[in-house]
Image (cartoon, grey):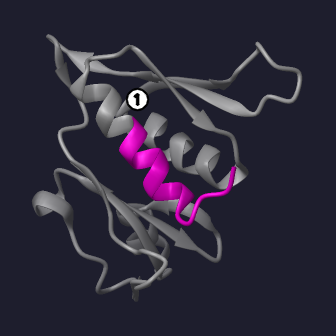
Amino acid sequence: MSFTDPISDMITRIRNAQLRTLNTVSIPNSKFRAKILDVLKEEGYISDYKPSSKEKNNKFLLVDLKYNNGIPVIREISRVSKPGRRVYSKAESIPKIQNGLGIAIVSTSKGIMTDNDARIKKIGGEIICKVF
């Protein structure tokens, strides 16, 4: 099954699972999605993720969502750069999300990282999504 925008699909699956207060959500596996989930895990927005062990191909990633007193840790997650309109930014002009309380996930030439890491390393790139 092919998607027009697999990153938007992943974000929507996470958002819908949190609306239903599910503990885990299944996302189709890819290296790019796994890197984005690595950033979300490092920043404390999700508990963990792992390849599904049910199938031998590991076609899905099982994401453990994080809640604080029954309220999802991710209040808002949205796609910024879309296939129809890519959004690129220099290191100096990467926007701060909620005055620095949230993060933007940026795809740079040095890999996928948060907006703060990109500013520190002075690397610009494509703004994938914003999380608060």
Percent coordinates x, y for residue 97 in the rendering = 19, 62
- Residue 10 covered by magenta stretch: yes
Tell how many labels.
1
What secondary structure is marked by label 1?
Answer: strand
* Residue carrying label 1: 46
Q: Quadrant of residue 19?
A: top left
Note whether 67 is above or below 34 in the view shown.
above
The secondary structure that most of the magenta stretch takes on is helix
38 on left or right of 70: right
Position of 107 relative to 77 (above/below): below
Residue toward you, 64 or 60: 60
Residue farthest to the front? Answer: 1
Query: What is the three-letter code of the residue carrying label 1?
Result: Ile
Q: Residue at x 20, y 46 (%)?
A: 76
Q: Residue at x 63, y 44 (%)?
A: 34
Q: Quadrant of residue 109?
A: bottom right
Along the viewing direction, whichever of 45 and 61 lies nearer the viewer? 61
Which residue is outermost to the left?
99
Q: Is residue 49 left or right of residue 20?
A: right
Q: Residue 113, position in %: x, y?
A: 50, 59
Residue 107 left/right relative to 8? right
Residue 79 location (% of width, % of height) = 35, 62
- Range of the magenta residues? 1-13
Q: Residue at x 17, y 39 (%)?
A: 75
User: x, y percentage for residue 111?
Assistant: 63, 65
Q: Residue furthest right?
A: 56
Tell me if mark 1 has few (under 14), some (14-19) or many (20+) residues whose alpha carbon lies within 10 angstroms of its own.
many
The structure residue drawn at horizontal position 67% and vertical position 57%, both measured from the top left corner, is 2
Residue 76 is one of the magenta-drawn residues:
no
Please, is residue 71 above or below residue 95 in the view?
Answer: above
